[in-house]
Image (tube, rainbow, N blue to C red):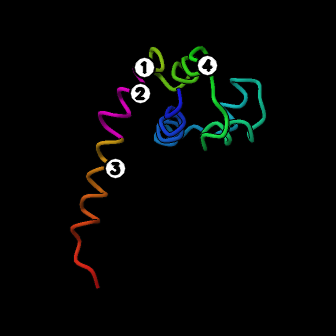
């Protein structure tokens, strides 16, 4: 679950879900969710699955697949465009 933090943050933001909502779901403070999303806290597969279900996925593996297929790919394309843009 080491890289899952970036997935949670990206998908949560895409879906318009606030950190406070995830905090309520997990019965923790919003600061704990922030630490999770910044990679300062690790979570179990069960907690990852709970978050994924809240965000509309069957489990964390499905959410990770979505991230890799759509979100991460889009970011890579943006990065490539930035690199090929003319410099001033």
* Residue 64, horizontal then vertical, whole percent: 41, 27
Q: Earlier in the sequence, mark 4 or mark 2?
A: 4
| Magenta stretch contains residue 40 | no
Q: Find numbered disc 2 in the image and state the secondary structure of the residue it sits on.
A: helix
Graded by Cα atoms within 10 Å as few (under 14), some (14 to 19) or many (20 or more), the crowding at tag 2 reads many
* Residue 84, horizontal then vertical, whole percent: 21, 67
Q: Earlier in the sequence, mark 4 or mark 3?
A: 4
Q: Residue at x 30, y 50 (%)?
A: 76
Disc 2 + disc 1, Cβ < 8 Å: yes
Graded by Cα atoms within 10 Å as few (under 14), some (14 to 19) or many (20 or more), the crowding at tag 3 reads few
Graded by Cα atoms within 10 Å as few (under 14), some (14 to 19) or many (20 or more), the crowding at tag 1 reads some
Q: What residue is disc 1 on?
A: 61
Q: Main secondary structure of the magenta part?
A: helix
Segment colored magenta: 62-71
Cα–Cα span, label 3 and label 1: 20 Å
Disc 4 + disc 2, Cβ < 8 Å: no
């Amino acid at each position: 679950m080491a890289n899952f933090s970036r997935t949670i943050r990206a998908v949560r933001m895409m879906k318009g879900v606030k950190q406070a909502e995830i905090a309520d779901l997990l019965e923790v403070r919003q600061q704990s969710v922030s630490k999770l999303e910044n990679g300062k806290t690790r979570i179990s597969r069960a907690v990852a699955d709970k978050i994924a279900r809240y965000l509309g996925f069957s489990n964390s593996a499905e959410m990770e697949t979505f991230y890799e297929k759509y979100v991460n790919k889009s970011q890579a394309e943006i990065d490539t465009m930035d690199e090929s843009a003319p410099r001033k």
